[in-house]
Image (cartoon, helix red, strand yellow):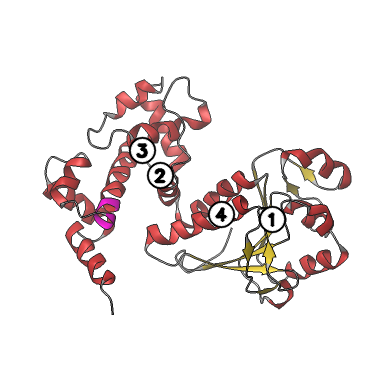
Amino acid sequence: MQKRKNSDSPRDVAVLLFRSFSNLCLANTIEPLRGANNLSGKTLYRWKYLSLDGRPVTSSSGLTVQVDSALTDHPGADYLFVMPSYDFLSHATAPCARSLRAAQNRFTTLVGMDTGTWLLASAGLLAGRRATIHWEELNNLAERFPDVDVSSDRVVHDGNILSCGGATTAFDLVLDLVEIHHGAMLRLELGALFMTGDASPVQPVRPGKVPEAGIALMRRSIEAPLPVIEIARKLGMSRKAFEKRCIDRYGIGPGRLYLATRLREAKRMVEQSSISVAEIATRCGYRDASAMTRAFRKEFSITPRDLRAQRDRDARPT
C-alpha cells in the first residue's frame, strides 16, 4: 500500500476529528499504533490530531481533544483518518467537502472511520470506489450515493481509500495496516497485547478462523507446548491441512508460529518483569535457559540478559 525503501521508517497519520466523535473509535485507532511502536522498540507510526478549524474538539462523551492544527494547515501525511462518528450529517457541508478534496492531494491514503465514509462520499471522493460504513447507514449510503460500491464488510481496502464499519472495526483496520507494513507476527503480538483477535479454541471452528484458533491454543499452552498434530486434532483437522492454513495466512508453518509465540512471550517477560531468565525459560516451555537463550538470540539478535541490561540502562534517570 505504501512504497517505502525501509518498512521501518515512520509513517505519519493525521486524525481529523469532528464534534461528537467516538472515544472508542479514536482509541481503537491510536492504541494499536502506540502498541506497535512499543512492541517493536521503534517509532513505526507518528500521529497528530486535526479539526476543520483548528479548534479543540469534544467527543460524544465529553472528552475534549486539543488538536495540533486545522486540516488546511497540515502539510500532508501517509494517512488521513476521517472520524466524525455521531452527528455526521451536520458535518457534511460544502466547506468540509472542499477541505477533504484538497486534502486528497496532500495525503497518500484517505480513511473513512465509522461514518467518516459519508463525508468522503459527500466530497465526491468515492465515485466508483468500494467502501463500507456503520451498518445502520449502509442502505442510506447506497441510496444517497449510487456511484459508490457499498459493502457490508467490516473493513474495505480500495487502493488509496480505506474504510471501516464502526468503532470496533477501527481496530481491525489498523491491524491490517500494521500487518501490511510490518508483517503478520507484529499483528499477532498486538492481538496478544490487547487480548483480541483470538478465535475461541473450541469446535467447530469456522474455516477462516482456523489459524487464529490454533494460535489461541498455542498461547494457552506456552509452558507445556502441545505437539502440532494435537493442536490440529483439537481443531478437527489433519496436521497437513492445519499447516497449509497457517502458511496461507502467515507465510510460515505452525511449528514456526508456535516458536515465535513462545519467544515473544519470553521477550515480554524479560522486558516487563524481574523474573530470572531460568524461570522465564521454564515458563516458555524450555528445559533450560541455554536452549532458550540460543533461540532468543537467533530471533531477536540479542540475548535475554543483554536485553534486560539494556532495559535497565534506559530506565536510569539522566
Distance from label 4 to label 1 (Cα)? 11 Å
Percent x, y of residue 286: 17, 41
Q: Which kind of residue does numbered mark 4 sit on?
A: Ala
User: Who is closer to the viewer here, 205 or 220?
Assistant: 220
Task: Look at the image and tell me in which quarter the C terminus lies.
Answer: bottom left
Distance from label 2 to label 4 (Cα)? 17 Å
Give the residue pinned by disc 3.
253
Identify the secondary structure beneath mark 1.
Answer: loop
Q: In which quarter of the view is residue 287 placed?
A: top left
Give the residue pinned by disc 2.
192
Give the residue pinned by disc 1.
21
Identify the secondary structure beneath mark 4.
Answer: helix
- Region rendered in magenta: 268-272
Q: Are marks 3 and 4 in contact (CB under 8 Å)?
A: no
Q: Nearer the viewer, mark 3 or mark 2?
A: 2
User: Which disc number belongs to residue 286?
Assistant: none
Q: Are marks 2 and 4 in contact (CB under 8 Å)?
A: no
